Amino acid sequence: MSEDNRYKLTYIICVIGEFAKKYRLSDKQAFNYLKRYKGLSFLDDCYSAEHTVSLNDAIDDLTMICNRNGGGLS
């Protein structure tokens, strides 16, 4: 695995954990929710921009993306 991919993976794992905390989910529940409502795809596709904002802003962005794709957390 390249170093860039390791950074991306570490970032995504961190964001999943913080998302889980915010919405009082387990890490597994947060992962499944983000996968189902395209939040993980968003983080992967937009990593270059998202990793430059605060975790709170990243979680807000994820919430918006997931809600647009049928998610219900707010």
Image: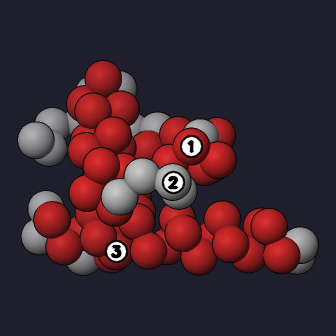
Look at the picture and state if 45 lies above or below 34. Answer: above
Residue at left 40%, top 66%? 15
Which of the pair 66/3 is nearer the observer? 3
Q: Which residue is mark 3?
A: 17
As helix, strand or loop, the secondary structure at mark 3 comes to helix
Q: In whole angstroms, how far apart are the C-alphas of marks 3 and 2?
A: 18 Å
**How dense is the environment of label 2, judged by Cα within 10 Å: few (below 14), some, or many (20 and up)?**
few
Do the CB atoms of the residues marked 2 and 1 lie less than 8 Å apart? yes
Look at the picture and state if 49 lies above or below 14. Answer: above
Q: Residue 52 in the image: state x and y as whole percent.
A: 51, 54
Residue at left 77%, top 67%? 5
Counting residues from the start of the chain, the first of labels 3 and 2 encountered is 3
- Kindly indicate the quadrant of the structure image that contains residue 16: bottom left
Which of the pair 32/54 is nearer the observer? 54
Q: Identify the amino acid type marked 3.
A: Gly
Look at the picture and state if 41 lies above or below 53. Answer: above
Q: Which residue is mark 1?
A: 49
Look at the picture and state if 15 lies above or below 1. Answer: above
As helix, strand or loop, the secondary structure at mark 1 comes to helix
Left of 6 or right of it: where is 47?
Answer: left
Q: Kindly report which numbered mark, 3 or 1, lies closer to the viewer in this rendering.
A: 1
Q: Residue 4 in the image: state x and y as whole percent.
A: 80, 67
Q: Identify the amino acid type marked 1.
A: Ala
Quarter of the image that includes the C terminus:
top left
As helix, strand or loop, the secondary structure at mark 2 comes to loop
Q: In whole angstroms, how far apart are the C-alphas of marks 2 and 1?
A: 6 Å
Q: Which residue is mark 2?
A: 52
